[in-house]
Image (cartoon, helix red, strand yellow):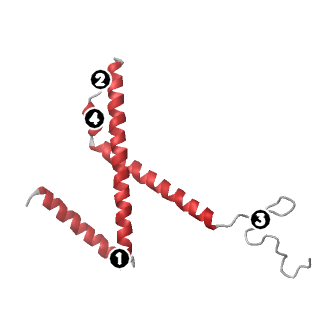
């Protein structure tokens, strides 16, 4: 068995186990395509961060060399830790972006608070409504 086939088999087995566990926890199978799209978006963000980190690292290494401040090997920028840290950057950025998007959606769905004539904002949903039992 080739190494590539072995790795794919291991990933397929753990993916199947995760799917079975999710179904036992009540997760709907219909949500898997959306989860795959989000995973692809995360992989794309990871690759962008990874490429950016390698490019910036190479630029800094060449600048340090050019200024005579020392010598940094270019291959250091391709260390696996750069990939792992790029994945963390992508996860944080995508989580932040998603939270921002949800906040914007909530803000569009929530009506603005009505202001009374004194300039004091009214409670949401209670704008200019008399208190229960109060006379106007």
* CB-based contact (under 8 Å), mark 4 and mark 1: no
- Between residues 64 and 101, which one lies in front from this camera angle? 101
Q: Comparing marks 2 and 1, which lies closer to the viewer?
A: 1
Give the quadrant of residue 12.
bottom left
Using the image, determine if residue 3 lies above or below residue 36.
above
Q: Is residue 85 visible?
A: no
Mark 2 highlights which residue? Answer: 71
Mark 1 highlights which residue? Answer: 29
Q: What is the number of the mark on residue 114?
A: 3
Mark 4 highlights which residue? Answer: 76
Residue 39, given in percent of the width and then of the height, sits at 35, 60
Sequence-first disc among 4 and 1: 1
* Image position of 106 (left or right of 118): left
Q: Secondary structure at mark 4?
A: helix
| Residue lying at the far left of the rendered structure | 1
| Residue lying at the far bottom of the rendered structure | 133
Give the Cα separation between the discs numbered 1 and 3.
43 Å
Sequence-first disc among 2 and 4: 2
Give the Cα separation between the discs numbered 2 and 4.
11 Å
Q: Is residue 62 visible?
A: yes
Using the image, determine if residue 77 lies above or below residue 115.
above
Residue pictured at 27% horizontal, 68% vertical: 15
Q: What is the number of the mark on residue 3?
A: none
* Image position of 128 (left or right of 64): right
């Amino acid at each position: 068995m080739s190494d590539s086939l072995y790795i794919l088999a291991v990933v397929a087995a753990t993916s199947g186990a995760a799917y079975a566990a999710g179904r036992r926890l009540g997760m709907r199978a219909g949500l898997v395509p959306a989860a795959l799209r989000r995973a692809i978006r995360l992989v794309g963000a990871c690759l962008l961060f990874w490429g950016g980190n390698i490019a910036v690292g190479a630029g800094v290494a060449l600048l340090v060399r050019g200024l005579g401040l020392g010598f940094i090997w270019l291959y250091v920028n391709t260390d696996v830790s750069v990939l792992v840290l790029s994945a963390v950057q992508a996860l944080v950025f995508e989580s932040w972006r998603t939270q921002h998007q949800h906040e914007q959606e909530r803000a569009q769905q929530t009506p603005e608070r009505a202001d009374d004539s004194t300039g004091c904002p009214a409670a949401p949903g209670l704008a200019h409504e008399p208190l229960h039992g109060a006379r106007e």
